[in-house]
Image (spheres, rainbow, N blue to C red):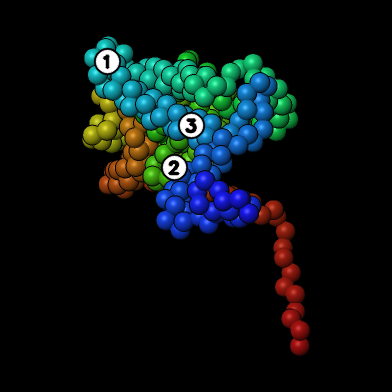
Amino acid sequence: MTPSPGGGRVGEAVPISPIATIQNAPESFLTLIYEVLNYPLFSLGKAELTLAVIIKLVALCALVVFGEQLLRHKFTMRVLKRTAFDAALQYAIARISGYIIILIGFYVALTAVGLNLNSLAVVAGAIGIGIGFGLQNIIQNFIAGIIILAERPIALGDRVEVGGIAGAVAKIDLRSTKIVTSDNISIIVPNSNFLTNPVTNWSHGDPRVQMRIPIGVAYGTDIEKLKRVLTEVAEENPDALKDPACTVYFVAFGDSSLNFELGVWTQTMTHNPSSFRSDLNYAIEAKLRENKIEIPFPQRDLHIRGGSLGAQPGPS
C-alpha cells in the first residue's frame, strides 16, 4: 500500500483521538440546540415559525405586560393624582391607556420577531370564525368593559345592585367587575350584566340616599307622639344626615296596624347599609317600648251567628 502523507496507509481508517472528541462535544451540543431552536415548525404566510421565534415572542409580550403595569402605575401616581379628575375617572383613563399600550406593544413584538399582520391574515380569519361561534360571551363582556370604562355608569367604590347581587365595586376589568358584599365576599360579575340588566347605583352622582324603615303600630296610637319618637331615633343616629331632615310617612291603613315608614338620609349606603338599617331597627324598638307604643300582632275578628251547637255524645 502507498503510505499517506500523515504516515498511514491509503484506505486505512485514521483513529480519532478521545481528547479531540471531548473537545468537540460542547460545540456539537450547541450545534444541536441551535438546530432545534431554528427548526421550522410551521409557516404563517411567508414567515416560518420556529421555537426560537416563539420564545422570543413570549419574552417580548411578557416584557410589554410588565412595562404596561409599571407605566400605568407611575402615570397614575405621578400625573393623574395631580389633576382635578376624580378617582373613578383617573382609574378609567389609566386602564384604557394601559390597554392601548398593550395593543401597541404586542404589534411591535410581532414585528420584531419577523411576523406581520399580513402573515397572520389566515390565522386571524380562523380566529374570527372561532370568536363568532365559541367566544361570543367573552367578546360581549370585553366590549361592555370598554363601555363601562368610557361612560362610567359605575365607578370604583360605588354601591351597586345588579342581578340580585349588592355590594361595593372593587375592581373593573375588561371582562368582569369585582363586587365586594357587606359580608366581605368577592363576587365576579360579567360586564355584560351591567348593560343588559337594570342596575341600581346608590352612589351615582350624589352619594346621599334615603333609606326607608317600615313600622306598624296599633290602631288608636297617638300619631303625633309616634312622629316625635321616630324623629328622635333619626336625630340620635350618628350616620343619619341632618340635612336633608328625616321624614315620617303614613303609608296605609293595614289589616291589623297603621303602617308608617321612617325615611332617613344617609351616606352609609356605600359602606354598610345592613348595619345602618339594623341600628335604626334596634333604636326604634327601644323607643317604642320606652314610650309604650304598641306594635300589634295580626288580628282577626271571629263572628258567630245565632243558633245553638248541640253537644255530640262521645263514643261509649
Q: Which mark is residue 56?
A: 3
Between 3 and 214, the one nearer to me in the picture: 3
Circle nearer the viewer, 2 or 3: 3
| SS class, disc 1 | loop
**Marks 2 and 3, the one that precedes in the sequence:** 3
Task: Give the farthest residue toward the bottom.
Answer: 316
Find disc 2 in the rendering and name its residue.
Answer: 186
**Quadrant location of the N terminus?**
bottom right
Tell me which residue sits at (48%, 31%) in the image.
56
Q: Quadrant of residue 185?
A: top left
Between 33 and 222, the one nearer to me in the picture: 33
| SS class, disc 2 | strand
Q: Which mark is residue 79?
A: 1
* Tag 2 near tag 3, CB within 8 Å: no
Q: What amino acid type is highlighted by mark number 1?
A: Val
**Quadrant location of the C terminus?**
bottom right
